[in-house]
């Protein structure tokens, strides 16, 4: 500290003089900045998102509970607790699986019923869908009453019903509108002299507005599982609205599916279940593990694929998946599949949704066709990702579209209904389209598609339906994905691939075209989502065709390679970028840094050093016992607010310039308010930050890293250790230089692009 600097007595105390009067680099951060109100703050990216510190949560979970007297009763309770604590996670996994299956059953049955209302009703009961209604009279469908007999009026009713369902689904989703805010505690909470501050200045700042029940929810869940918090995303209201909204959205026959939302719904169920267990509710790391477990149940019930659900959670969703999570996810997915099979929403009594039996095998020459399907699937996926990104950046940024999401949904529903109804191949909802395209045609009379393909002449109309259906699915999926309704992209991609594969299959003799529809659907979905292992398992669980695993693998790998060449990111990564969700994946980060190093040379951790003024404001100079004056803490909070630091975090520096602790701005406010309220401070207004009452708020051993360390070290610490912040220290003396948070690191990575 410069010797000519003067401080008012109210800002310095004799206790702290000895701690900060040393001539060392650490003391430079004890400068007091004058409070000055500046203009309205500019929110940096990722403001409003919470940050979880997995390392601190790990330490908290490993600490023993309070000691109990060694009486016989307490010993018995301790022994029971020893087994009850680990058993809770297995029990929770079972509960999540059961509840997810119950919700999936209700949604599946409702979607089929509401969708059939677009064409008619059952005279035996309006709540029965067409399949159940026709089963009443052995398939003669006497009780099913169409709304109209002429094509014109049936077309009009179909379009009007789809518009009504779409408007309702979107309007319902609008009720989950939430603001991500940066809280600004009023200064009167800290200093009664500031009580005259206007309420407008104390108002929380809105960082972003989100509709929690729209989309698939997978990009948001990936952000949560990578260490960030999105308030209200997993609430009971969001789960209910998403379930009901998915019913009416899927019933419109838009190019979307309910399978993506199932993952979000199951994660909500996992969160609500875990909140009832203290060991999960109070520990961010354990909560993350339970959410990963719940994700597997969502895809398990979506496709009847319990193993695929586990692999999907591992490959696509989670960034942290230890063996204990794998085992519990396996149980959760199994229970969900077992319960759903017993509930039998499809009426077949089988778990396999699209069971096939083609009766013929493929030859080596057919691998060329499978590779071709993979190439076309990669092109489809790459073009889709790029076009959807451009659509979101252009059309959805038009002011009247941006302000009226329900109107956008109605436009898309209208276009979809007008284009799809004339084509019988794509008229129904996505899962029914997939079911009829995978038909094996062992019997010509099995389906009208089989009759069309059995014709020797006059197939031009059928071919036109296949070609136009494929193109329509591509265009409609591009403009649909991202609309403000509960929606997923998995089923539309499968439909487009099945249409294209069935079309290619018409040119290959002596083999069922359904085989290429099946492989083509996998290829197109791989191009869109870039899944590999989990998708292969899902496809053979979905169809029951274990013999076709090699063709699936060939097509999926080819599609992924081609799609990666066209568009580096999959659909979920692009969705995260569009809405600005934070996401940190070690492999992606290291690859980005590697590309930068090849072009501009290696980066060191010191490249992340904050501005000196910001470091000084957020530094607390404390004694060896981490004691500090209350007036000093209030001054630091006031400085942070007046310099527009909206999400401050304070590093504790001792008299030697060594970082000896960390406390967030919110926790520091809590500490100050608690002390003032309870009048806990005596002896001249001095408080110990590591006292028994406040120790849970303070990280007494923050992770430190040399400023000269490669920046890849920080990437590994943030992504794999899960730390929320890293103290930067001098290489020679280990004295504190500055603090880098996970959000700071993400913003730095964004600046490299």
Image: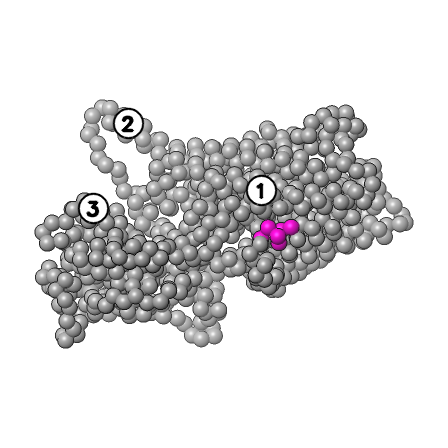
Where is mark 2, residue-wise?
A: 77
Report x, y in % for residue 639.
26, 63
Name the residue rendered at 51%, 50% in the picture: 211
Classify mark 2: helix, strand or loop.
helix
Label 3: how many residues lie within 10 Å, few (<14), some (14-19) or many (20+)? Answer: few
Report x, y in % for residue 346.
66, 33
Query: In this orientation, does residue 553 appear?
Result: no
Q: Give the residues in magenta.
A: 405-410
Query: Which mark identifies residue 245?
Result: 1
Camera-side mark, 3 or 1:
3
Quick one: 630 or 322, which is closer to the camera? 630
Classify mark 1: helix, strand or loop.
helix
Name the residue rendered at 14%, 74% in the picture: 3
Instruction: Answer with left or right where residue 422 lies relative to residue 344.
Output: right
- Mark 3 touching mark 1, by CB under 8 A? no
- Residue 342 appears in which quarter of the rendering? top right
């Amino acid at each position: 500290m410069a010797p000519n600097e003067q401080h008012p007595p109210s800002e310095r105390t004799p206790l702290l003089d000895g701690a900060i009067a040393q001539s060392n680099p650490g003391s430079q951060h004890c400068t007091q900045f004058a409070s000055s109100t500046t203009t309205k703050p500019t929110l940096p990216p990722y403001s409003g998102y919470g940050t979880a510190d997995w390392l601190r949560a790990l330490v908290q979970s490993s600490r023993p509970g309070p000691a109990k007297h060694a009486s016989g009763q307490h010993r018995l309770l301790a022994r029971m607790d020893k087994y009850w604590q680990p058993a809770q996670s297995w029990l929770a996994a079972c509960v999540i699986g059961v509840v997810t299956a119950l919700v999936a059953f209700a949604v599946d049955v409702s979607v089929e019923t509401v969708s059939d209302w677009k064409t008619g009703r059952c005279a035996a009961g309006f709540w029965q869908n067409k399949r159940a209604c026709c089963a009443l009279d052995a398939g003669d469908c006497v009780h099913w009453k169409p709304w109209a007999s002429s094509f014109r009026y049936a077309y009009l009713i179909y379009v009007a019903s789809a518009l009504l369902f779409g408007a309702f689904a979107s309007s319902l989703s609008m009720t989950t509108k939430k603001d991500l805010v940066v809280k600004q505690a009023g200064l009167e909470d800290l200093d009664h002299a500031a009580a005259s501050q206007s309420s407008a200045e104390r108002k929380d700042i809105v960082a972003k507005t989100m509709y929690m029940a729209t989309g698939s929810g997978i990009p948001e869940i990936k952000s949560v599982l990578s260490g960030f918090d999105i308030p209200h995303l997993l609430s009971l209201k969001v789960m209910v609205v998403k379930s009901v909204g998915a019913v009416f959205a899927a019933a419109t026959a838009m190019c979307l599916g309910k399978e993506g939302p199932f993952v979000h719904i199951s994660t909500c169920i996992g969160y609500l279940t875990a909140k009832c267990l203290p060991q999960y509710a109070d520990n961010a790391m354990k909560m993350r593990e339970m959410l990963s477990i719940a994700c597997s149940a969502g895809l398990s019930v979506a496709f009847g694929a319990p193993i695929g659900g586990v692999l999907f959670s591992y490959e696509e969703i989670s960034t942290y998946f230890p063996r204990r999570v794998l085992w519990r996810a396996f149980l959760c997915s199994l229970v969900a599949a077992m319960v759903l099979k017993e509930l039998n929403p499809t009426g077949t009594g089988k778990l396999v949704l699209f069971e096939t039996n083609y009766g013929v095998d493929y030859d080596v020459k057919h691998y060329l066709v499978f590779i071709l399907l993979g190439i076309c699937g990669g092109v489809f996926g790459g073009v889709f990702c790029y076009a959807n990104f451009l659509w979101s950046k252009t059309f959805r940024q038009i002011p009247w579209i941006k302000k009226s999401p329900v109107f956008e949904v109605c436009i898309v529903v209208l276009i979809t209904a007008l284009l799809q109804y004339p084509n019988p191949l794509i008229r129904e909802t996505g899962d029914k389209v997939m079911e009829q395209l995978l038909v094996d045609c062992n019997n010509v009379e099995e389906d009208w598609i089989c009759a069309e393909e059995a014709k020797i002449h006059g197939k031009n109309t059928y071919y036109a339906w296949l070609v136009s259906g494929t193109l329509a699915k591509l265009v409609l999926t591009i403009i649909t994905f991202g609309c403000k309704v509960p929606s997923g992209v998995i089923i539309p991609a499968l439909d487009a691939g099945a249409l294209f594969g069935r079309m290619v299959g018409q040119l290959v003799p002596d083999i069922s075209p359904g085989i290429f529809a099946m492989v083509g659907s996998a290829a197109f979905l791989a191009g869109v989502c870039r899944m590999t292992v989990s998708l292969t398992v899902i496809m053979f669980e979905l169809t029951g065709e274990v013999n076709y695993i090699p063709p699936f693998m060939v097509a999926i790998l080819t599609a992924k390679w081609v799609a990666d060449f066209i568009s580096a990111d999959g659909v979920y990564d692009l969705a995260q970028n569009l809405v600005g969700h934070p996401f940190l994946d070690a492999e992606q980060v290291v690859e980005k840094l590697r590309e930068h190093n090849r072009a501009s040379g290696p980066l060191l951790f010191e490249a992340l050093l904050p501005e000196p003024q910001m470091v000084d404001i957020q530094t607390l100079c404390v004694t060896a016992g981490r004691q500090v004056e209350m007036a000093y803490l209030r001054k630091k909070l006031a400085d942070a607010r007046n310099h527009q630091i909206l999400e401050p975090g304070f590093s504790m520096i001792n008299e030697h310039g060594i970082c000896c602790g960390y406390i967030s701005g919110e926790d520091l406010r809590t500490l100050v308010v608690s002390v003032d309220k309870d009048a806990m401070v005596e002896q001249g207004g001095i408080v110990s930050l590591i006292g028994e009452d406040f120790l849970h708020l303070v990280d007494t051993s923050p992770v430190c890293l040399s400023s000269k360390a490669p920046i890849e070290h920080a990437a590994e610490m943030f992504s794999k250790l899960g730390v929320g912040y890293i103290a930067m220290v001098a290489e020679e003396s280990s004295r504190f230089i500055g603090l880098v948070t996970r959000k700071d690191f993400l913003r730095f990575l964004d600046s490299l692009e």
